[in-house]
Each structure stands twice: as structure tokens, then as C-alpha cells.
Image: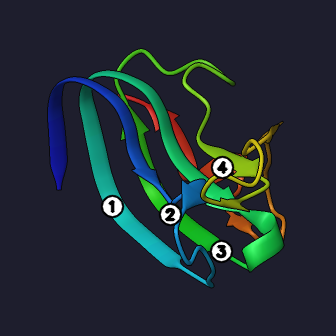
Amino acid sequence: FTLTGQHGKLWRSCGDCTGNGGPRNLTIISATVNGTIDSIAGVNRNFGDVAEIRDLRIKGYKEGKPPVCEEFNGVEKGKGKSDKYGEFWDTKNCKVSRSNVKPL
């Protein structure tokens, strides 16, 4: 698919939800971001969420801008903050390699 316009995140597994849990899975294959975006995917590593991304093209992409796959610590609603660990590549939760992300 092609995403246009201005956006925050393309996808984020719930960071602070009632009955939060997982795992949640995201698969992106052959997508184009032809707009402005803050990040592509956010997963909760402690709930086993997984984002698999292949063949992604992003307008004006430079490594880290925008972050492609970010890992978080998910929490139950009202039981703390969903801390962000940062951007990760080739982990069990962020199944994306740098070679699969290109500038548009």
C-alpha cells in the first residue's frame, strides 16, 4: 500500500490498555510512505508483540528518521508508564533488517 499525508505512527500495539496483553503481530510487505510520519511500528517486547517489515520505502528516509521499529514495555491501564527502549533491528520483536528499508 501507499501512505500519504502527515501521520504519527503507522502502527502501535497498545502501550497502556485495560486487559493489555499479547502477542500482537504486524506484517508489512512492499509498502510506501510518501508523506510525513513520526515512526512506522511500535511493539511491546514484554508481551511478545512482533513487527515484521520487508520492502519498505519512505520519503526522505535517513537511518533513524523516522524510526522503523521501536520496542516498548507495555503496561496495564493505570499501572505505570509504557517506557520506550528505542529503535531496534533484527530482534525477535522487530523483524526488520536495514536492507529492507530504503528512501523513496
> Going by the image, does 56 lie left or right of 41?
left
> Going by the image, does 65 lie left or right of 48?
left
Q: Nearer the viewer, residue 55 or 67?
A: 67
Label 2 with label 4: CB-CB less than 8 Å: no
Quadrant of the image containing the C terminus: top left
Separation (CA) of disc 3 from disc 2? 17 Å
Residue 27: where, in percent of width, then height? 44, 73
What residue would you read off at disc 1? 30
Separation (CA) of disc 2 from disc 4? 9 Å
Separation (CA) of disc 1 from disc 2? 6 Å
Examine the rendered structure and indicate whether residue 62 appears above or below residue 32: above
Query: Which of the 4 image quadrants contains residue 21?
Result: bottom right
Helix, strand or loop at disc 2?
strand
For the residue carrying disc 2, how many other residues have a C-alpha within 10 Å: few (<14), some (14-19), or many (20+)?
some
Helix, strand or loop at disc 3?
loop
Separation (CA) of disc 4 from disc 1? 13 Å
Label 1 with label 2: CB-CB less than 8 Å: yes
* Residue 28 at least partly seen: yes
